[in-house]
Amino acid sequence: MQRLLKPDSQIIITTHHKPDADALGSSLGLFHFLKNKGYTNVTVISPTDFANFLHWMPSSETVIDYEAKTEHCKALVAAADFAFCLDFNWLKRINEMGQEVRNGKCQTILVDHHLDPENFDDYRLWDTSACSTAELIYRIIMDWGGKEAITKDIAECLYAGILTDTGNFRHDTTNATTHRIVADLLEAGAKSSYVQAQLYDNYSLDRQRFIGYCLAHKLEILPGLPVALFTITREELHKYKIITGDTEGLVNYGLSIKGIKLAALIVDRTKKIKMSFRGTGKFPCNEFAGRYFKGGGHFSAAGGESDDSLNNVVNQFKTHIKEYETYLV
Ligand code: 5GP
Ligand code: MN
């Protein structure tokens, strides 16, 4: 990569819409590293806004929201020599910006750990065994700059990505290497209690009441199947003043019920129906999401979307899930 980038290269870093802590943390981790290496023309563009609990990340205030500043972002994409594409591998994951990146003059560098890449990229660091994209950014930095290159800002951003994408070190993507990387990040100055407080103790009272409401009234166990389903209407989102990031984590409550093998969350968002799937055991969430809901992701955590009505999507889910009964063990 050192050979590829020139000191005056115009570089953009982008990630999937509604970025989570891995998406934004890996983007900002790379941003800080490139800046420290002397690259002056580096900008992080997010296709949309992002959750309040990510606004603590160092330099998050410099991230440009494509939806809010579309013309400015279009000009940046058009002028870019290189576009780092982090934590996604289909251009539709960056919404309208995808076509601009595809048609633009920039060379694309994919850094990702999701299955089934689209193959739009010119260069890639793609490894589905990585626990997070932050782990891949850590590898780039170690190869290029060594441990001394990991500043406290970088360490905090990458720590947040690893922590959240491993489900707080609970998923089976977590291994000894993960913990060794984390040890390096802590030594570089990341403070675990600080990062965790920023990520997990930053919700509004409305959001907490919303979770309570969903657990009490919106959690359905499908008859005869080890499947938990939350279905959330637009009115409910409105009633509890739900904003970007507030539904994150909800689906996991379904999966933590004893015996449940698949948890699903289907939400009627303003433009589309959005769903999240979390599985344990043999259920291939990414394949299911891809086959029926134009989605993808990881084997045990995936998502999808639909332009159909909420009712229809719920019915489609209930029908199709029966076809996968043998995987629900
Ligand atoms: P979440 O359910 O938290 O939105 O996403 C879970 C995982 O699935 C993440 O790794 C995310 O990148 C991926 N994912 C979520 N929604 C979609 C989608 O609509 N399309 C694709 N390709 N991946 C998705
Ligand atoms: Mn990720």
Image (cartoon, rainbow, N blue to C red):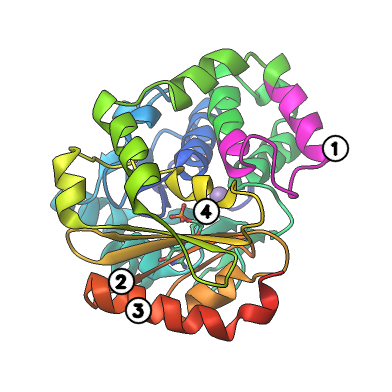
Query: Identity of the amino acid at label 2?
Result: Gln
Q: Which residue is mark 2?
A: 99
Q: Which residue is mark 1?
A: 176
Is residue 209 located in the magenta-colored stretch of the structure? no
Q: Say if disc 4 is inside 8 Å of ligand 2.
A: yes
Is residue 171 located in the magenta-colored stretch of the structure? yes
Q: Say if disc 1 is inside 8 Å of ligand 2.
A: no
Q: Going from the N terminus, do you reach mark 3 or mark 4 first?
A: 4
Q: From this viewpoint, is residue 281 visible?
A: yes
Which of 329/183 is in front? 329
Residue located 30% across and 56% down the image? 77
Q: Secondary structure at mark 1?
A: helix
Distance, label 2 to label 1, CA atoms, is: 39 Å
Q: Going from the N terminus, do you reach mark 4 or mark 2 first?
A: 4
Image coordinates for residue 269, horizontal then vertical, percent: 23, 58
Q: Quadrant of residue 268?
A: bottom left
Q: Secondary structure at mark 2?
A: helix
Q: Which residue is mark 3?
A: 315
Q: Which mark lies nearer to you, 3 or 4?
A: 3
Query: Identity of the amino acid at label 3?
Result: Asn
Q: Going from the N terminus, do you reach mark 3 or mark 1 first?
A: 1
Q: Which mark lies nearer to you, 4 or 2?
A: 4
Q: Which residues are magenta?
A: 161-185
Q: Which mark lies nearer to you, 1 or 4?
A: 1
Distance, label 3 to label 1, CA atoms, is: 42 Å
Q: Secondary structure at mark 4?
A: loop
Q: Residues within 10 Å of mark 3 (few under 14, many from 20)?
A: few
